């Protein structure tokens, strides 16, 4: 049996910038044996509960049901230097939505680029930076310490704490 990880990302389908960073973590730190990834692009966090997105996720789960288990993981930027995002109405709604549907939630504080580049990246430059991330080996400068925070603050995330629940770590 295999595991399907449905990665629901804030980015849009055309840019797919978040995918570069999420895929990097999945491939660098975890075994890929018996794991498949299906990617869903929200086109903005406001679309987290969009009916079309929800149906797409449900179809992916249904298509995989005869082959194994599926887990849905939302990857969302806090857009703040701490997790006060949780206190805002949108943050609370996303958290509640994930809890109600049995989905996991990964936070990037304040953005995914902030976590991996350690600086703010303007929206217009995100595609360029995602390409540089791999081509210029910026990925080698990523600290595992910043990827494993239970309560992430500025330039940190809980991505590895969530993925550790489902994926088998690589043996170095």
Image (cartoon, rainbow, N blue to C red):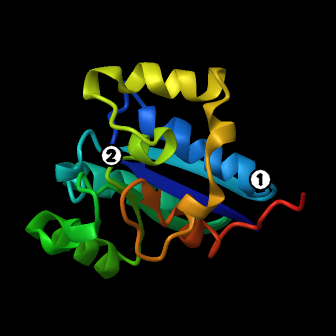
Left or right of residue 33: residue 112: left
**Coordinates of residue 81 in the picture (x, y in percent):** 27, 57
Q: Quadrant of residue 88?
A: bottom left
Q: Image quarter for residue 146?
A: bottom right
Count the marks. 2
Residue 31, position in %: x, y?
Answer: 79, 57
Tell me which residue sits at (61%, 63%) in the image: 145
Quadrant of res 29? bottom right
Residue 122 image point, x, y percent: 28, 28
Q: Is residue 72 above or below residue 132?
A: below
Q: Residue at x 28, y 64 (%)?
A: 82
Eyeballing the image, is 81 above or below 137? below
- As drawn, is 137 to the left or to the right of 62? right
Where is the C terminus found, in terms of image quarters?
bottom right
Question: Which residue is at the front of the view, 19 or 84?
Answer: 84
| Residue 92 visible within the image | yes
Kindly indicate whether the residue at mark 1 contacts the one at mark 2 (C-beta within 8 angstroms). Answer: no
In the foreground, 93 or 141: 141
Disc 1 on helix, strand or loop? loop
Q: Is residue 40 above or below residue 6?
A: above
The 10 Å Cα crowd at callout 1, few under 14, some 14 to 19, many 20 or more, is: some
Dot 2 or dot 1: first in sequence order is: 2
Q: Quote the CA–CA distance across marks 2 and 1.
A: 23 Å
The quadrant of the rendering that contains the N terminus is bottom right
The residue carrying mark 1 is 32
Using the image, tell me which numbered label, if any, was put on residue 10: 2
Residue found at the very far left of the displayed protein: 89
Is 93 positioned to the left or the right of 137 in the image? left
* Label 2: element kind: loop
């Amino acid at each position: 049996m295999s595991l399907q990880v449905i990665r629901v990302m804030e980015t849009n389908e055309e840019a797919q910038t978040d995918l570069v960073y999420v895929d990097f973590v999945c491939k660098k730190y975890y075994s890929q044996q018996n794991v498949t990834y299906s990617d869903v692009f929200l086109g903005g966090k406001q679309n987290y509960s969009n009916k079309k997105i929800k149906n797409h996720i449900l179809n992916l789960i249904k298509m995989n049901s005869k082959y194994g288990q599926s887990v849905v993981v939302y990857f969302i930027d806090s857009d703040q230097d701490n997790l006060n995002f949780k206190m805002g109405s949108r943050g609370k709604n996303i958290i509640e939505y994930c809890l109600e549907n049995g989905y996991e939630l990964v936070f990037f504080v304040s953005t995914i680029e902030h976590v991996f580049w350690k600086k703010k990246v303007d929206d217009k430059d995100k595609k360029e930076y995602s390409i540089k991330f791999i081509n210029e080996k910026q990925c080698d400068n990523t600290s595992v310490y910043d990827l494993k925070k239970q309560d992430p603050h500025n330039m940190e995330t809980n991505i590895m704490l969530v993925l550790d629940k489902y994926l088998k770590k690589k043996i170095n």
